[in-house]
Image (spheres, rainbow, N blue to C red):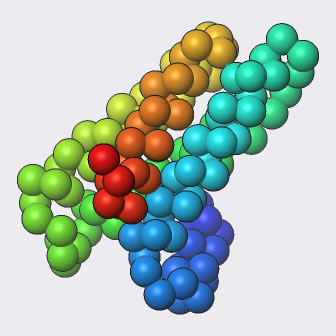
Amino acid sequence: MHSAAKAYGQVAQQIANPRELEARLLLKAAARLQHVREDWDKDPSDLGEALLYNRKLWSVFLTSVTSPDHEMPAAIRQNIANLGLFVMNHTIEISRDPRPEALVALININREIAAGLLGQP
């Protein structure tokens, strides 16, 4: 987990806008999950790696928004934390009972949060 946070921090320093970085990472995770979903019948072997990437990303978000010195309003932080907990629990469910349609929720959450971070409707 530490390596994911470290990598996130290093990339964040290279990009001026942290919101844009977060959006890009969420879109990358969504794309990986979408690829697994689309190729499920051919080869679902990338499922574990895609779920792991998404889980690490959300772990970083959860750690960040639950920090008492985070600048975001408490209500928004709570909403992000709740989404993060859903993502974690849903990931466990998918790991127990892998189904391509179960990936849709994770893909949509990542895309919607990314759109919000980028200021898109």
| Residue ID at (59%, 88%) | 14
Q: Is residue 93 visible?
A: yes
Up/down of 93 relative to 16, above or below: above
| Residue ID at (85%, 27%) | 45
Q: Position of residue 107 (x, y in %)?
A: 52, 34
Q: Residue furthest right?
A: 42
Q: Is residue 2 visible?
A: no
On screen, residue 121 versus residue 48, left or right, reads: left
Q: Position of residue 25 (x, y in %)?
A: 56, 59
Q: How many marks?
A: 0
Up/down of 93 relative to 108, above or below: above
On screen, residue 83 versus residue 14, left or right, reads: left
Up/down of 7 relative to 15, above or below: above
On screen, residue 42 versus residue 94, left or right, reads: right
On screen, residue 13 versus residue 38, left or right, reads: left
| Residue ID at (61%, 65%) | 4
Q: Position of residue 108 (x, y in %)?
A: 46, 33
| Residue ID at (52%, 23%) | 104
Q: Quadrant of residue 69?
A: bottom left
Q: Position of residue 120 (x, y in %)?
A: 35, 53
Q: Quadrant of the N terminus?
A: bottom right
Q: Quadrant of residue 103?
A: top right
